[in-house]
Image: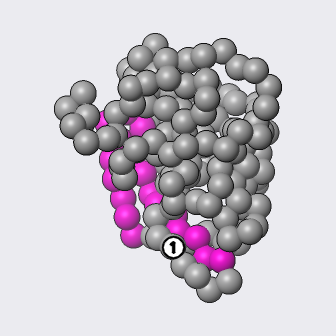
């Protein structure tokens, strides 16, 4: 892992900012590398660890299927959800995407973002990430990201 500057999630903007991320993003699930990317988009929002949006060309899309779940982000628009099927073992809603994001978020159109807690192993530049606490937000916590983070008990009103 290369040294990175420490970032406080309280310095991130609201509304969120999208920026290119040219480090290495990898996800292993069921013993298979399902994501390997060097051209992700990183979304930064106050009180949240970064979310990484991966282009479909860098994802084993043959293992993913759309689910019925939909949610709405006040900034990015309507999110669609994705499940994974590895060797007949299906898991629902492990990732989400914005197929038609609102203005300002076009860079993440059609990219998938993943819940680190629902995948076996997620990595940013070789460092295994910790999932953001809670079951709604999908931020990835690395050693250079400091909080406190929204998502845990008692933080929904932040």
Could you say where residue 91 lies in the image, as x and y percent from the top left?
51, 73
Instruction: Determine crowd level at label 1: few under 14, some 14-19, many 20+ residues with C-alpha closer than 10 A.
Output: some
- 6 falls in the magenta region: no
Residue 57 vertical placement versus 31 (above, below): above
Could you say where residue 63 lies in the image, as x and y percent from the top left?
67, 72
Left or right: 21 as drawn, with respect to 95: right
Residue that label 1 marks: 91
- 74 falls in the magenta region: yes
Question: Looking at the image, which residue is at 76% across and 21% down?
Answer: 3
Residue 34 makes an appearance in the image = yes
Could you say where residue 41 lies in the image, as x and y percent from the top left?
64, 35
Q: What secondary structure is the magenta-colored segment mainly?
A: strand
Q: Which residues are magenta?
A: 68-86
- The kind of secondary structure element at disc 1 is strand
Question: Looking at the image, which residue is at 38% across and 26% down?
Answer: 148
Left or right: 26 as drawn, with respect to 118: right
**Quadrant (top left/top right/bottom left/bottom right) for the N terminus:** top right
Question: Looking at the image, which residue is at 55% across and 51% down?
Answer: 116
Residue 43 vertical placement versus 140 (above, below): above
Question: Looking at the image, which residue is at 77% across and 40% down?
Answer: 126
Left or right: 76 as drawn, with respect to 59: left
């Amino acid at each position: 892992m290369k040294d990175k500057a420490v970032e406080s999630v309280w310095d991130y903007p609201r509304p969120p900012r999208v920026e290119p991320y040219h480090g290495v993003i990898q996800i292993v699930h069921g013993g298979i590398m399902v994501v390997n990317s060097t051209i992700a988009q990183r979304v930064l929002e106050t009180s949240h660890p970064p979310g990484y949006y991966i282009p479909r060309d860098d994802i084993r899309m043959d293992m993913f299927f759309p689910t019925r779940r939909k949610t709405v982000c006040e900034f990015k628009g309507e999110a669609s959800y994705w499940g994974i099927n590895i060797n007949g073992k299906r898991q629902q809603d492990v990732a989400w995407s914005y197929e038609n994001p609102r203005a300002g978020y076009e860079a993440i159109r059609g990219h998938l973002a993943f819940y680190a807690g629902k995948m076996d192993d997620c990595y940013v530049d070789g460092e295994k990430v910790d999932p953001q606490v809670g079951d709604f937000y999908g931020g990835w916590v690395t050693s250079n990201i400091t909080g406190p983070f929204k998502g845990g008990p008692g933080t929904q009103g932040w």
